[in-house]
Image (spheres, rainbow, N blue to C red):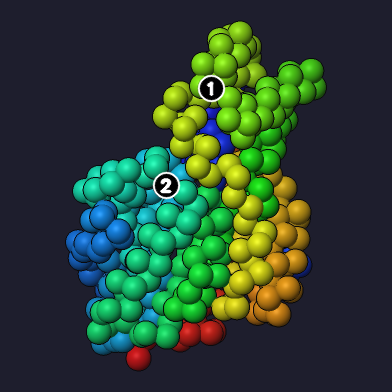
Amino acid sequence: MRLFPTLFPGGIFLLCWLWGCAPRSAPETPGPPPDRQDVTVEDVYFAHGNDRLAGSLFLPTAPGPHPAVALVSGSEAHDRVYGGVGPALGRWFAGRGFVCLTWDKPGVGKSTGDYTAQSFHDRAGEALAAVRFLLGRADVRGDRVGLWGHSQGGMVVPLAASLSAEVAFVIEVAGWQGPAWEQDPVRVEAELRAAHFPEADVAEAVAFARRRMDLIRGGRPFGELDRAQETVMNRSWFVAVHRCDRVRFESARRVVGHDSGPSWEGVRCPVLVIYGDKDTSSGPPDGLVTVIRRGLAKAGNRDVTVKIFRDADHSLRRPREGGRKGEDDPEFVPGYLDTMTAWLTERFGHGR
């Protein structure tokens, strides 16, 4: 029995009621369609605090100004490519009239800084810096710039939108919702069950994941966790738990206390929520959607669309045998890409 790493691992902690049953037709292949406009790509830079962030800007060749979307990735050391998703979505959106920005996280690729030192508020500030960069361009509509966030990015974008009225829309994809520290035991259990581990192994692994969170949240020294890890590293279930080193331990302390629930209470722009029903990183979507709906209801925001795709994993691809993520499949599940652009076009058009 073996588990495989996901394209969007999101670290060991944060991988960071319209039932959308995708038809079993040909899968969607990201890329510019031959019957749509061409796409150009620019290397760009923008600032957040003392960091100089490097990215790629995907632009329609048709005259603007255009609506725009900034892509907020999950946790860990992701660059602008984001496992291929960055350019895939960049070309998809730009090919349909939307400017799209993707960038290297601080300290990754050509960006300066250190993503491991960031809190959720730091990440939200970075996302808003990307929005302001787009707002400063003549080829972008100043009232139509929004955020797309995946995995941990799905927790970052509601926080950013709650902090700034400049965010015109939010697309939340496969993000954990609620207290961040609660995700890791859910992830461990979901991955092991999908891989058909015995119940005793699942229970033991989940108990260890909870203990790890308690040590991180309780301010215990890293050595205490490291000694505990040494005693279980040879267990078969440890493949889902993963070893936590000191850097991840200290980084986790900056983020595990964040609760995304209250963020949604300050989001007043249109929201599109997307999950796969076979997500083993964030777990079953129903409870996560409930958190989002509850927060938006408190905000008085009724402009929310929820789409849950059947047989889709954390990356909105087909899961593989034994719970393995579909990162080796370059194609998203049918309807995922079209859902986003149709939703955007309905509300914001696609260029001048």
Q: Residue at x 70, y 55 (%)?
A: 288
The dot on residue 301 is none
Q: Residue at x 66, y 62 (%)?
A: 262
The local secondary structure at tag 1 comes to loop
The dot on residue 118 is 2
The one nearer the camera, 67 or 307, is 67
**Direction bottom: furthest residue:** 352
Q: Residue at x 62, y 56 (%)?
A: 260
Any part of residue 293 in sight? yes
Q: Residue at x 51, y 16 (%)?
A: 223
The dot on residue 221 is 1
Check contact, mark 2 vs mark 1: CB within 8 A.
no
Mark 2 or mark 1: which is in front?
A: 1
Q: Is residue 72 above or below residue 169?
A: above
The local secondary structure at tag 2 comes to loop
What crowding class fits label 2: few (fewer than 14 Cα within 10 Å), some (14-19), or many (20 or more)?
some
Q: Position of residue 152 (x, y in %)?
A: 52, 50
Is 64 placed left or right of 181 in the picture?
left
* Residue kind at label 1, given as amino acid type: Pro
Q: Position of residue 138 (x, y in %)?
A: 25, 84
Q: Is residue 116 above or below residue 167?
A: above
Q: Position of residue 185 (x, y in %)?
A: 68, 34
Q: Position of residue 206 (x, y in %)?
A: 71, 27
The one nearer the camera, 295 or 173, is 295
